[in-house]
Image (cartoon, rainbow, N blue to C red):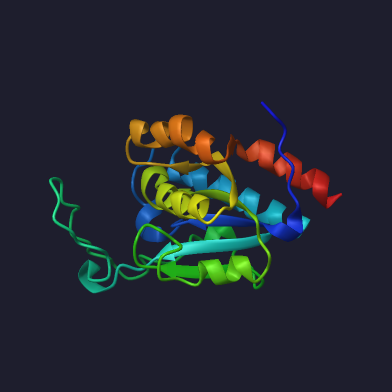
């Protein structure tokens, strides 16, 4: 597999929905606790290398009123967001220079200020992870690809509710719009840059 290179000034780590209400569920093939742990490692390595760190969280509003509801064959269950549902996991160690973006749907670009943070800093490459692989991560990846961003997908810093929902995008789709690597691969690259 080809080695990756990272230019800190034009790269951002974007972590999707690593918040109490989402990480509390069962995820595969990686447990949410491992995804959060790997995301925290990535975030610290990015900070050390001078890479922008962006945490995206979803706020569905009271009773899920802000989340899109469309006619479908398999309706999504109603949201009953409890207090703290949108709080980012404390293990992530959100720093004062990190950016927090709030969205109300899976795609982190739609109706948020994510693109402003990226474009005004001259970001060209996004390192992407989060939960769920097939929802928030994939919809954000599609939007990033449409906007011409290079992407690095961190396979063990993402997970889904069912194995195939994780493995299909990781094996079949993400490699067509970016590069798929492990936390260890990305941290090693960032460590070399930070020296």
Q: Give how far across and how far down residue 135 sits, in percent.
A: 36, 49
* 16 in relation to 178, above or below: below
Q: Is residue 177 left or right of residue 138?
A: right
Q: Give how far across and how far down residue 146 sits, in percent.
A: 49, 53
Q: Give how far across and how far down residue 77 sits, in percent.
A: 18, 54
Q: Say which residue appears at 75% left-offset and 60% top-offset.
A: 9
Q: Nearer the viewer, residue 2 or 95?
A: 2
Q: Quadrant of residue 165?
A: top left
Q: Is residue 108 left or right of residue 81?
A: right
The number of callouts visible is 0
* 109 in relation to 28, above or below: below
Residue 41 makes an appearance in the image: yes
Residue 29 makes an appearance in the image: no
Quadrant position of the N terminus in the picture: top right
Q: Say which residue appears at 22% left-offset and 62% top-offset.
A: 79
Q: Say which residue appears at 56% left-offset and 71% top-offset.
A: 116
Q: Quadrant of residue 178?
A: top right
Outermost residue, top side: 1
Q: Give how far across and how far down residue 169 sits, in percent.
A: 42, 36
Q: Is residue 179 left or right of residue 191?
A: left
Outermost residue, right side: 195
Q: Is residue 129 left or right of residue 162?
A: right
């Amino acid at each position: 597999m080809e080695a990756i290179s990272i230019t800190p000034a034009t790269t951002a780590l974007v972590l999707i929905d690593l918040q109490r209400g989402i990480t509390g569920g069962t995820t595969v093939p990686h447990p949410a606790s491992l995804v959060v742990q790997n995301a925290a490692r990535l975030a610290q390595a990015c900070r050390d290398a001078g890479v922008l760190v962006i945490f995206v969280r979803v706020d569905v509003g009271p009773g899920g009123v802000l989340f899109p509801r469309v006619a479908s064959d398999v309706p999504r269950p109603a949201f009953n967001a409890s207090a703290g549902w949108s709080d980012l996991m404390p293990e992530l160690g959100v720093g004062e220079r990190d950016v927090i973006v709030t969205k109300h749907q899976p795609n982190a670009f739609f109706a948020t200020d994510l693109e402003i943070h990226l474009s005004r800093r001259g970001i060209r490459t996004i390192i992407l992870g989060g939960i769920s692989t097939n929802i928030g991560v994939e919809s954000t990846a599609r939007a990033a690809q449409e906007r011409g961003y290079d992407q690095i997908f961190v396979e063990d810093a993402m997970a889904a509710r069912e194995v195939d929902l994780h493995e299909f995008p990781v094996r079949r789709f993400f490699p067509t719009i970016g590069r798929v690597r492990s936390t260890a691969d990305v941290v090693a690259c960032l460590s070399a840059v930070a020296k």
